[in-house]
Image: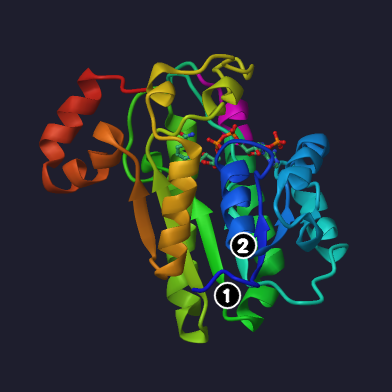
Amino acid sequence: MQIQGKVVWLTGASMGIGEALAKTLDAAGAKLILSARSEDKLQALLNSLKYPQQHRIVPLDLADGENISTVVANTPLPEGLDILINNGGISQRGLATDTPVPVQRQVMEVNYFGTITLTQALLPALLASKGMIVNIASVAGKVGGQSMSGYAASKHALIGYMDCLRAEEASKGLKVLNVCPGFVQTNISVHALTAEGKQYGRVAKSIAEGISPQACASEILRAMQKNKFEVVIGKGLSAWAPTIKRWFPVFFTRLSARKNIR
Ligand SMILES: NC(=O)c1ccc[n+]([C@@H]2O[C@H](COP(=O)([O-])OP(=O)(O)OC[C@H]3O[C@@H](n4cnc5c(N)ncnc54)[C@H](OP(=O)(O)O)[C@@H]3O)[C@@H](O)[C@H]2O)c1
């Protein structure tokens, strides 16, 4: 898909991969609708873009399912909508035995239910444009590991839902791309929920050693331009994990039981 002139709704735009994607798409000539909860950060991002007059800010809380339809209803789309990028999300760190269901549910509310609620609300516009939905899932949406049961479950669920949506709507021209990054240098682990439901507050070593958000955004753009349906992005074990699991499942199962790669 060509990006120049396309209307793109991007969630999680206030920082990290979303911020890098906003800059990449701005440079590529897209017209952006930038969403996240932090309006001040979205405003600062907008001011830093090359073509700020092309873009808009629409604050949105993905955990507030009931309000998502209202936000969509109050956001006129005079030029339609070509691309929805479901990037907003939170992570989680804690053993499954320690993490109570309310914390698991919090992760699902944002990463899964909030994301599919927004997707459903925008689906008529995306079908009308024969557009594209891009989901920033994760390698954790393809394989399981230690200390991330809620996060991995939410990303597996997202990929499952989006694979079904693609199967149902491909004949009408809708494209669905699932992006599975490995570790990317953002503050995702700082904001991750612990078993107690508090913020983890630290940049994990694995994240610090990941690829840059800019490199990740460039690869996402390339996958969009090539109309891919799934792409794994990253380096090292985190990027190879889905391939290792597929071809050497016994080895992968033993490895993940031995090693906490987060
Ligand atoms: N970094 C990695 O290693 C990595 C790897 C694989 C996948 N991912 C995925 O990439 C996406 C972006 O993560 P990131 O690494 O860029 O993390 P990040 O720096 O923590 O950014 C997360 C983004 O999501 C937004 N967000 C969080 N909770 C939200 C809510 N309730 N409603 C609306 N927006 C919300 C945040 O904005 P506000 O706080 O302003 O709302 C922020 O813009 C996530 O879906 C994550 O799961 C990241």
Q: Place residue 29 in its image quadrant.
A: bottom right
Disc 1 versus disc 2: distance between alpha carbons?
A: 8 Å
Question: Which of these two is toward me, 131 or 43?
Answer: 43
User: Do residues under tags 1 and 2 come within 8 Å of each other at their CB atoms?
Assistant: yes
Write the residue at 64% across / 62% down.
119
Is residue 160 in sight in this rendering?
A: no
Residue 105 falls within the magenta-colored stretch = yes
> Dot 1 lies on which element?
loop
Instruction: Name the residue tied to disc 2.
Output: 84
Q: Residue furthest front?
A: 50
Ligand 1 quarter of the rendering = top right
Q: Is residue 248 above or below residue 177?
A: above
- Looking at the picture, how far across and down is residue 210, in whole percent? 39, 30
Compared across the picture, whether 45 is left or right of 236 comes to: right
Q: Residue furthest right?
A: 74
Q: Specify the segment rendered in magenta.
A: 99-106
Q: Place residue 3 in its image quadrant.
A: bottom right
- Looking at the picture, how far across and down is residue 71, in whole percent? 83, 56
Amino acid carrying mark 1 in the image: Gly
Write the residue at 64% across / 64% down.
30
> Between disc 1 and disc 2, whose residue precedes?
2
Residue 171 falls within the magenta-colored stretch = no
Instruction: Name the residue tied to disc 1.
Output: 131
